[in-house]
Amino acid sequence: MSKMAPDIVADAFPRLFRLQQIFPRPRLDDVVREVGLELAKLDLANRIRPHQRIAITAGSRGIAGIPAILAATGTYFRSLGAVPFLIPAMGSHGGATESGQRAVLASLGLTSDTCGCPIESSMETDILFESPLGFPIHCDRLAHHADGLFIVGRIKPHTLITGPIQSGLCKMLLVGLGKQKGASTIHAALSEHGFFEILESSVPRMVRELNVLGGLAIVENAYSETATVEAIQPGEFLTQEPRLLEQATEWMPRLPFDDVDILVIDAIGKDISGSGLDTNIVGRKFNDNRAVPGEKPIVRRIVARSLTPASEGNGLGVGIADIITQKLYAAINQEVMWTNGITSGHLGAVKIAPIYASDRAAITAALESLPCIHPRTTRLLWIQDTRNLLEVDCSEAYLPSAQSRSNLAIQGPLMRMEFDQNGQAIRIIKGLFP
């Protein structure tokens, strides 16, 4: 495939070098064994009778080793004589349809074969009770009518929610299992109440009424590996999640620099983050299009190149980017995306940014939107996505800072930013999203 003339590329764009980031790396060598050991701590043998149907939650996020984790969970319950099955706990994802939610699970490698459990899916909900704060609490009907419920989920900072509990077991119980009706209700309630206030008023009663048997909390490291798993008693979700959130925040990946003119992202997607791209990583948790005072990093322009196939057309997050490519836009299923945006109340994330026909045109537009910055001094970072930050392409303006830090390793010389004859980028980091 032919490339653009090197002198044109060199004149128009900053040169890049490859940078490897070094993060703390706590990890489990045998995740399945650890899951079994943790579940045994719950001492459920006296609470479960033979042939009871136990619903186990399966979310819509890309969690490391999640098929094996869910399979080990199912094995544990079968060892007690129970009949486990998986249910999607993902709010309105998958276009808010039963088949769509099954498809989301399949895209994550979650099938009855890989998990060793049947998957039952429905968008029907029951209203469990009226919250003391004045709104109904919905729950997946299959979960409500099961003999017991077990929550499996990852603990991490949420892209919008603040406070001591964010993404995790409580959110999966309250929002994920609420399906579209419940998720929409909770997101509307967030306009008047803090998330922790909502949890305190609802989770304890949900635990009782749904016979929640416990939870398995997963925390990952910056390498997208399982750092720890922890079984939590049902009455301790509210007290234990804050500690695990602190741990998850400490171990999560970050951009190598806090001052960024242009951030190019190969892919956004629902399997990467609930908002398509993690706003904690790009510094847009409180405002979709800029960092608020005191927030880091400061990223002035975001260029998004594509949508992950596992998103099934849900382009939520496209509005957080400032510029997108035609390739990304063509992959969006607007109905699916709008359903998620309306349900979550995150309308800014589904607005369409300016669309450019190629990577070259999109990056050029980003440069032209910052007229006071010369291409050679532009602080540009290029990443695969907001989960995979071990290797980053950095513009030469960052070279002196990179050379002075022990947690950064320069992997190669300065290289030209190159494009093929159609203006599509030829990446210098092997294995990144095409």
Image: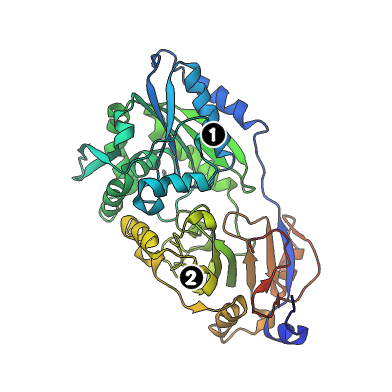
Name the residue located 55 percent from the left edge and 40 percent from the top edge. 219
Q: Earlier in the sequence, mark 1 or mark 2?
A: 1
Asked if one can make out residue 17 in the rendered structure from this viewpoint, the answer is yes
Where in the figure is residue 79, as x and y percent of width and height?
50, 17
Please tell me whether mark 1 sits on a helix, a strand or a loop. helix
Mark 2 Cα shell of 10 Å, populated few (<14), some (14-19), many (≥20)? many
Asked if one can make out residue 346 in the rendered structure from this viewpoint, the answer is no
Where in the figure is residue 393, as x and y percent of width and height?
69, 66
Please tell me whether mark 2 sits on a helix, a strand or a loop. helix
- Number of the front mark, 1 or 2: 1
Where in the figure is residue 69, as x and y percent of width and height?
55, 33
Which residue type does callout 2 highlight? Tyr
Left/right placement of residue 123 relative to residue 427 reads left
Extreme-right residue of the structure:
413
Left/right placement of residue 313 relative to residue 176 reads right
Mark 1 Cα shell of 10 Å, populated few (<14), some (14-19), many (≥20)? few
Report which quarter residue 211 is drawn in. top left
For the residues labelled 1 and 2, the Cα–Cα distance comes to: 34 Å
Q: Which disc number belongs to residue 113?
A: 1
Q: Quadrant of the N terminus?
A: bottom right
Relative vertical location of residue 237 with respect to residue 19 in this rendering, above or below: above
Name the residue located 35 percent from the left edge and 49 percent from the top edge. 97
The colour scheme applied to this rendered structure is rainbow
Where in the figure is residue 210, as x and y percent of width and height?
31, 29
Name the residue located 55 percent from the left edge and 82 percent from the top edge. 365
Q: Nearer the viewer, residue 133 or 416?
A: 416
Which residue type does callout 1 highlight? Asp
Q: Quadrant of the C terminus?
A: bottom right
Q: Which disc number belongs to residue 329?
A: 2
Name the residue located 60 percent from the left edge and 53 percent from the top edge. 253
Q: Nearer the viewer, residue 257 or 341?
A: 341
